Image: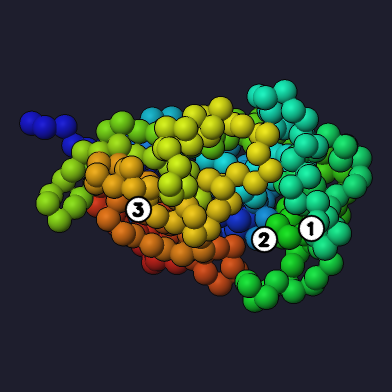
Amino acid sequence: MAQKPRTVICVGDIHGYISKLSNLWLNLQSAIDPSEFSSALVIFLGDYCDRGPETRKVIDFLISLPEKHPDQTHVFLAGNHDFAFSGFLGLLPRPSDGSDLKDTWKEYEGSEEREGWYRGEGFEDMHLQGRRWAGKIKATFNSVKGMAYKGSIYDAGSTFESYGVPHGSSDLMKAVPESHKKFLTNMVWVHEEDDVCIDTEEGLKHCKLIAVHAGLEKGNNVEEQLKLLRAKDTSISKIQHLSGRKNVWDIPQELDDKHTVVVSGHHGKLHIDGMRLIIDEGGGFPDKPVAAIVLPSKKIIRDTDNLSS
């Protein structure tokens, strides 16, 4: 008898909503056969922090999973928000080219005043995104999102508050527990699988899978991009694979042979197009669900589904 294909669960951006995460997890447990759930590969697509009120509890929940589900494999991708959080806490690796983290400021210094970059303790050796994350943005309303900013351009105010410190305070560096720092340090920028199964119109198909928070860039060599992501190259001011928009939306042409699934969150949309899976229905909005996709079936499960009895 052929072995059943392994269940792969990809979970979209959580953004500090612990109740959505725990409801989604219960719904996944209800929707998936217990033996398949207990041995599933679970890929979290990043953006655990900011916007929602309970970043601290979300990270506690994620850290507890390996002990609760020892036969599952858990992968935690870094989202652009988590990358910036790590940058503020001084957890990013040094740039491999020998440059300083402060060299990442130059490209965007025209935005420093408008975005109110952090200038407190430790800023001199901080990645650009850490300074933007803990900064105090001049504008109060984000017209693109249609909601008020929470402290910074990243809406990091709610993350500071979840650890009991005011937005922009260097006290956060002491308030975040070691276990959370370890979690943030160990996040990966990309995850690759050589053999996952996916249901297609032609039946069940074996293919590769690349999971990256925002996507891969069009027109650039894919292997070069993967190298940069595996190496966590922090010399880059803005890592498009974690924070790009239109430029990382599609599968790069080079992978368009229908043998590689590219799965991401980040974009504030649920978009399933052939082998390109974008799973971020919530986008950090209070009234939108957190969703996950289950492979091979491509079934979408949401925190709002009424599945757990």
Seen in the picture, residue 69 relative to 201 is either above or below; the reply is above
Q: What residue type is labelled 2?
A: Arg
Residue at mark 2 to residue at mark 1: CA–CA distance: 22 Å
Left or right of 5? Residue 53 is: right
Residue at mark 3 to residue at mark 1: CA–CA distance: 33 Å
In the image, which is nearer the foreground, mark 2 or mark 1? 1
Label 1 element class: helix
Q: Do the residues labelled 2 and 1 touch (CB within 8 Å)?
A: no
Left or right of 189? Residue 94 is: right
Q: Residue furthest right?
A: 120
Residue 92 quadrant: top right
Residue under label 2: 51
Name which residue lies at 75% across and 64% down.
Answer: 150
Residue under label 1: 111
Name which residue lies at 8% across and 31% down.
Answer: 1
Residue 189 at x, y percent in the picture: 54, 37
In the image, which is nearer the foreground, mark 3 or mark 1? 1
Label 3 element class: strand
Asked whether residue 165 appears in the rendered view, the answer is: no
Q: How many labels does the image show?
A: 3
Q: What residue type is labelled 3?
A: Arg
Residue under label 3: 276
Judging depth in this view, the residue of 158 and 105 nearest the camera is 105
Query: What is the crowding at mark 1: few (fewer than 14 residues within 10 Å), some, or many (at least 20)?
Result: few
Q: What residue type is labelled 1?
A: Ser
Quarter holding the C terminus? bottom left
